[in-house]
Image (cartoon, rainbow, N blue to C red):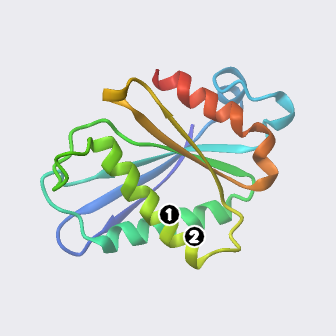
Amino acid sequence: MKSIENIFSDNQGNQLMVALYFYDDNEKINTLKIPAEYVDIEIADINIEKMELDQPLCYVALSAMNRWLFDQFKSHPNAIFSFICSLDELNNNHENMPPEQYRWKLFDALYQRFIKYNQNADIQTQDVIFGPDEYLSYTRTFYRTKHAPIIHVVGAHLKEKYN
């Protein structure tokens, strides 16, 4: 599995480590069940880790991460990226919201803000929410219009992987 990683500082003592993990051809065929005619499509999972869990993270790191992810998407014109929100505990000021929902809303807000200013980017999304009510998992897949015929296969894998 090939990976690309980057670290983004918030200039206040915290950092985000972001990685793209690309599936190799065997994983695409055997694990994801991608039809052989689509094996040339790059498929990557997005992994985001906050380095100092007990410290807040300033927006500058999130903004830089967003720009980098977009640049990676542009530099991989035949790619599909997927993101799964962690169920890990999260200290925030939203006590009535589970951590995965908070992460989802944050990631979605970043995406919506970015796409507003980059309307010609040809970035489509497919959201998959699954699991019992008390443990919902939120995923989002980013793809180009030309990849629409197989996006349901990636979504089905995400459901199966985390159910």
Q: State the image coordinates of residue 35 (x, y, percent, origin top left).
A: 81, 28
Label 2 close to label 1 by CB (< 8 Å): yes
Relative vertical location of residue 137 with respect to residue 82 in this rendering, above or below: above
**The label number, if any, that marks residue 40 in the structure image:** none
Task: Kindly identify the amino acid type of the residue bearing the numbered disc 1.
Answer: Tyr
Left or right: 74 as drawn, with respect to 8: right
Q: Residue at x 73, y 59 (%)?
A: 77
Relative vertical location of residue 117 with respect to residue 58 in this rendering, above or below: below
Relative vertical location of residue 65 with respect to residue 132 in this rendering, above or below: below
CA gap between label 2 and label 1 equals 6 Å
Image quadrant in which you'd find residue 107: bottom left
Q: Which residue is mark 2?
A: 115
Counting the numbered discs, the total is: 2
Relative vertical location of residue 134 with respect to residue 149 in this rendering, above or below: above
At numbered mark 1, what does the secondary structure look like: helix, strand or loop?
helix
Q: State the image coordinates of residue 82 (x, y, percent, origin top left).
A: 56, 44
Work out whether residue 150 or residue 41 is closer to the camera in this orientation and state it: 150
Q: State the image coordinates of residue 38 (x, y, percent, origin top left).
A: 81, 37
| Quarter of the picture holding the N terminus | top right
Q: Residue at x 37, y 58 (%)?
A: 106
Q: Which residue is mark 1?
A: 111
Q: Residue at x 26, y 37 (%)?
A: 88
Q: Residues within 10 Å of mark 1 (few under 14, many from 20)?
A: some
Residue, far bottom: 117
